[in-house]
Image (cartoon, rainbow, N blue to C red):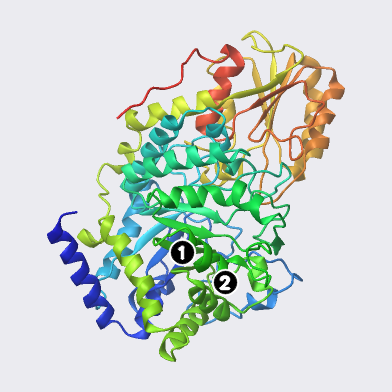
Amino acid sequence: MNASQKEQKQKTIDSLLGALTPEEKAGQLMVLGFNGTIADPETETFVARYNIGGLRISPYIRKFIRYLPDGAPGVENVLRPPRPGEKLWNDGVKPPSFRAAEYAGVLNGLRRLAMERRHAIPLHMVIDYESGEGSNYLPPGLLTLPAPMGFGRLDDPDLIRRALRAAGRQLKAMGVDQVHSPVVDVNTNPRNPEISTRSYSADTEVVIESARAALQGFAEAGIIATLKHYPGRGESANDSHHGLSAIKMDRAEFYRRHLAPYARLCAEGIVPAVMPGHSIYPMLDSSGEISTVSRPIITGILREEFGFDGVITTDSMTMGGLMARYTVGEAVVKAIEAGVDIVLLKDDNSLRYEAHAALAEAIRRGRISEERVNQSLRRIWSLKWDYGLFNNGGLARVEGLNEHLFHEDYQGVGREAARRAIHLLRDRAKILPLRPEQQILVIDRPSSNSTNANDYWNYPGVFWECLRRHSANVTYLDYQPKTVQTANGLIEQLAPAMDVLVVTAWYDRNSHDDTRQFLTGLLRYGKPVVMISNNPYEELVVPKEMDTVVVAYSLLRGSLEAASHYLYHGAPAQAKSGKSK
């Protein structure tokens, strides 16, 4: 950026700061959930009238209800009666399935609405994309990369950079501006129910090197990356989506193992944004305050000690732990007071109005000073300017987009990543490779993302499609935890005619289902069993009795294609990639 551009940027930001009302400034501090593929009237109202800054997009769910189950502490803080104009859609029914070009067109419509506002401040579109199954949207062609841990074990940062640059370019073409990744939690607890393979490693140095490469890849693609979950959830034994967790560790050890990624990467000046997690860290804040609303943790350590002056965005504000202590209005105000810049609220109900009203009131009455609000707005708008959103409002080019995602520049690196991430955990029975003449029974647990997408690219049963490229002797059935009894009946009838059973086991961090008893029950048929898993941890999914285990770090198309090839042909000879430009 030359001197003239910097001057224009500064003049634009200064002009906006002097022109916005407290209500408009409150809206700019908020990112709301846009759930589904249809732009409903209330979403349009929040863009046009409430001047919100951005949207966290989740095309696979029609309506976000809540994280907290009935009876949980704080559930009264997220339950609200319906209001006129609210979409009252069944969240168990899937929204219309849109390909990338159709969905980008919907986002373009919301962007145009934002640019018609009084001050024409562009929206930014945010999505969860952690590779693997950690994505809120996987239209045909978008890379289904292995989970971060699959990359972390390869000792090849350049592959991470190239893979996330490719995925980032696809996302940018679709109209995505920011991703809530990479995850820099150091997964030191093998039983961690929430982080697990979302982490690059249990080794801090591997996490730092991998995250640095991810940041470079996203930056080269023009995507705003977000380190999470500050100050670190790798040691957790609980899931913060549904309840409050406390991380207890010696302060010096926590700095060395879990805070080091933030300290090092922020010092390098390559971090655009950071997301705190909703947990308690008594070694960092002796008051026992939740990190999202803790001034010692947000301002004291991240801002002042680590020198981070980028954007800090919360995770969704209605997760369990936070709502057990505060109303949503009080929580969003306390987060801004603590040093956060953007509050994320995914709920499709009147909580959005309450949050906006609380922020506007706090700004009007001076509880949050004008100086403090302007600090955040400068950071937010500066980031949007630097990533080009003030040029044309971030509009995506829809023509040819669906075909563009299939470009070999993207797909080639996706195939490389999936094949190299395949990890033979063990083959004590020496079953592999399989032979095409063997009769194979595939017992498949489809992942939720394949069920959510359910298009020709990712769907329940895609593993069968992949395997049949290598052998015609493949019989297929699928199962879910609630259908294992039915599956057992079918397996009992089919097993005698089979040579090998191939079973997929998927660790679902959202439901924490334990299917290990079903998996070990397959051994009773006296047939060799090959297990394909997205997770290597025996504590979570892999029974120690299984003799042959292949970890693919995802059960989506890219990794299932790689796993199918591996089962019949083994690993391709491939050296560590060189440094590409």
Instruction: Say what secondary structure mark 2 lies in.
Output: helix
Q: Are marks 2 and 1 in contact (CB under 8 Å)?
A: no
First of labels 2, 1 by sequence position: 2
Quadrant where the C terminus sits is top left
* Label 1: element kind: helix
Q: Amino acid at mark 1?
A: Arg
Q: How far, Cα to Cα, is label 2 from label 1?
A: 14 Å
Q: Is residue 10 left or right of residue 322?
A: left
Residue corresponding to mark 2: 293
How many residues crowd mark 2 within 10 Å: few (<14), some (14–19), many (20+)? many
Question: Which one is in front, 580 or 328?
Answer: 580
For the question of whether residue 119 can be seen, the reply is no
The crowding category of the residue bearing disc 1, from other C-alpha atoms within 10 Å (few below 14, some 14 to 19, many at least 20), is some
Residue 552 locus on image (x, y percent): 60, 29
Q: Residue at x 77, y 13 (%)?
A: 429
When asked about the image quadrant of residue 215, the answer is top left
In the rendered view, would you say 98 is above or below 131?
Answer: below
Expressed as whole percent of the image width and height from the top left, the position of residue 17 reads 28, 78
Name the residue type under label 2: Val
Residue 273 placement, left or right of 14: right
Relative height, residue 579 to residue 541 (above, below): above
Give x and y (percent) for residue 86: 50, 76
Front disc: 2 or 1: 1
Q: Residue at x 68, y 66 (%)?
A: 68
Of all residues, the one furthest to the right in this rendering is 524
In depth, the one of 307 and 504 nearer the eye is 307
Residue at 21% x, 77% y is: 15
Residue 144 shown left or right of residue 552 in the figure: left
Place of residue 318 in the rendered image (x, y in percent of width and height, measured from the top left): 59, 69
Which residue sits at x=67%, y=13%?
432
Q: Please, which residue is most extreme toward the left here?
A: 4
| Residue hosting label 1 | 303
